[in-house]
Amino acid sequence: MQQERKFAVLIDGDNIPASYLKEMMEEITKYGNPTIKRIYGDWTNPQLKSWKNRLLSNAIRPIQQYAYTSGKNATDSAMIIDAMDILYSDKVDGFCIVSSDSDFTRLATRLREAGKHVIGIGERKTPEPFIVACDKFIYVEILKPSTQDNDKETNPKPTKTEKISKKSIRLLTNSIEDVADEEGWAFLGDVGTILLKKQPNFDARNYGFQKLTALISSLNKFEIELRDAGKGRRSKLVYVRVKS
């Protein structure tokens, strides 16, 4: 059995709405075990009050960073210093940087250079350089179930899903063709892997679908084939092909 990845979760408390915390932590557990969980900010600032009630139930350690000149810059510096200390301790396999701030672009790049898997989580306003510096980037807006109460302070209304563009369809097409066999069939798992390498923020949930299979099925440009996984397994392997 493959050993589960250990992640350090570092949250920019000045930069992310507290109402997404539960969904963010649930999302992170899909990729590994969050063994280190820290959130940074000036806890004397009343604007961070909404975080305090949520930290204990999620076992997240608050790190106090006074706003010496600029609170935002001070928080960024504290996160970066801690990330490098954790990196050199070699206690984790990856990092999850929760912020919409492009100041963490260089940090994400450095962590990946050291062989660590880097997941970014932030709002849709996150600048492109930080997104592409991560192995995978997830928008917080797609994590909040639409059935939640839409009270602006505690449960902000989820951003509407995007309509898939011609550019995204072209990305799908090229990625399928990149890993396809001689008959044009590609294993969906391989397609998903290369999609993230090309565009770390590609996620079927951005377009209103829970899985990549459902997204591809909704488009009239691809074929889907289910194949036996073999050795008595009930699950099926999904293969896709661009329609000729």
Image (cartoon, rainbow, N blue to C red):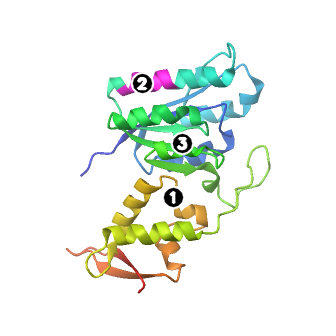
In this orientation, which residue lies closer to the viewer: 166 or 210? 166
Residue 105: % across, % down = 51, 36
What residue did someone put label 1 on?
202
Could you say whether the residue bearing mark 1 is in a helix, strand or loop?
Answer: loop
> Residue at horizontal 46%, vertical 49%?
136
Q: Is residue 169 left or right of residue 54?
A: left
Q: Earlier in the sequence, mark 1 or mark 2?
A: 2
Do the numbered discs 1 and 2 sit on residues whose CB atoms are within 8 Å? no
In this orientation, which residue lies closer to the viewer: 182 or 223? 182
Could you say whether the residue bearing mark 3 is in a helix, strand or loop?
Answer: helix
Residue 13 highlighted magenta (yes or no): no
What residue did someone put label 2 on?
84
Q: What type is the residue that disc 1 sits on?
A: Phe
Q: What type is the residue that disc 3 sits on?
A: Pro
Report how far apart the C-alphas of labels 1 and 3 lie in the structure.
Answer: 15 Å
Residue 144: % across, % down = 64, 54
Report how far apart the C-alphas of labels 3 and 2 lie in the structure.
Answer: 20 Å
Asked whether the viewer can see residue 123, the reply is yes
> Residue at horizontal 46%, vertical 69%?
172
Residue 216: % across, % down = 49, 75
Q: Is residue 225 left or right of residue 1?
A: right
Asked whether the viewer can see residue 236, the reply is no
Q: What type is the residue that disc 2 sits on?
A: Met
**Magenta part mainly helix, strand or loop?**
helix
Residue sitting farthest toward the left: 231
Residue 177: % across, % down = 36, 72
Residue 129's mark? 3
Residue sitting farthest toward the bottom: 244
Give the residues drawn in magenta, as a range.
80-87
Q: Earlier in the sequence, mark 3 or mark 2?
A: 2
In the figure, 39 relative to 176: above or below? Answer: above
